[in-house]
Amino acid sequence: MPHHHGSGSGQRSRQKLPSLTGVRFFAAALVFFFHASLPEVLGVFEDPGFADGYAQALSKVGFVGVSFFFILSGFVLAWSARPEDTL
């Protein structure tokens, strides 16, 4: 059995996941772009034709972004949890 060097307690330390943590930005950006597509929320586009096309193109992306954000965040939290952590 391999010996893990740690903080003296013999427990193995988990590596941090900065790349996966950074991917959460893209999921949050999808949610932002979805909200920007809703004219009743922000109304950022003056041209109604462009606003309708933008809204149609991004109609599902917000839901995907939220789901991906929560799944990824749950994984990162579970990965970084230590046995000595409390609820």
Image: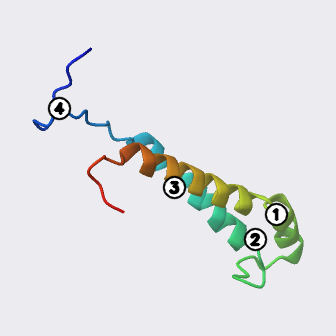
* Labelled pair 1, 4 in contact (Cβ < 8 Å): no
* Labelled pair 2, 1 in contact (Cβ < 8 Å): yes
Looking at the rendering, in which quadrant would you find the C terminus? Answer: bottom left
Give residue 37's mark.
2
Front tag of 4 and 2: 4
Front tag of 3 and 2: 3
Q: Is residue 46 left or right of residue 67?
A: right
Q: Amino acid at mark 2?
A: Ser
What separation in Å lies between label 1 and label 4 (alpha carbons)?
Answer: 50 Å
Residue pictured at 50% horizontal, 46% vertical:
75
* Labelled pair 1, 3 in contact (Cβ < 8 Å): no
* First-in-chain label (1 vs 3): 3
* First-in-chain label (4 vs 2): 4
Write down the residue under mark 1.
Answer: 59
Residue pictured at 71% horizontal, 66% vertical:
34
Write down the residue under mark 4.
Answer: 10
* First-in-chain label (1 vs 4): 4
**58 w.r.t. 18: above or below:** below
What separation in Å lies between label 2 and label 1 (alpha carbons)?
Answer: 8 Å
Looking at the rendering, in which quadrant would you find the N terminus? Answer: top left
What separation in Å lies between label 1 and label 3 (alpha carbons)?
Answer: 19 Å
Label 4 secondary element: loop
Residue pictured at 31% horizontal, 37% vertical:
14
Front tag of 3 and 4: 4
Give residue 25's mark.
3
Q: Amino acid at mark 3?
A: Phe
Where residue 33 appears, as percent x and y from the top left, is 67, 65
Label 2 secondary element: loop
Q: Nearer the viewer, residue 84 or 61?
A: 84
Q: Nearer the viewer, residue 64 or 13?
A: 13
**4 w.r.t. 45: above or below:** above
Q: How many C-alpha atoms fall within 10 Å of the one at disc 2: few (<14), some, or many (≥20)?
A: many
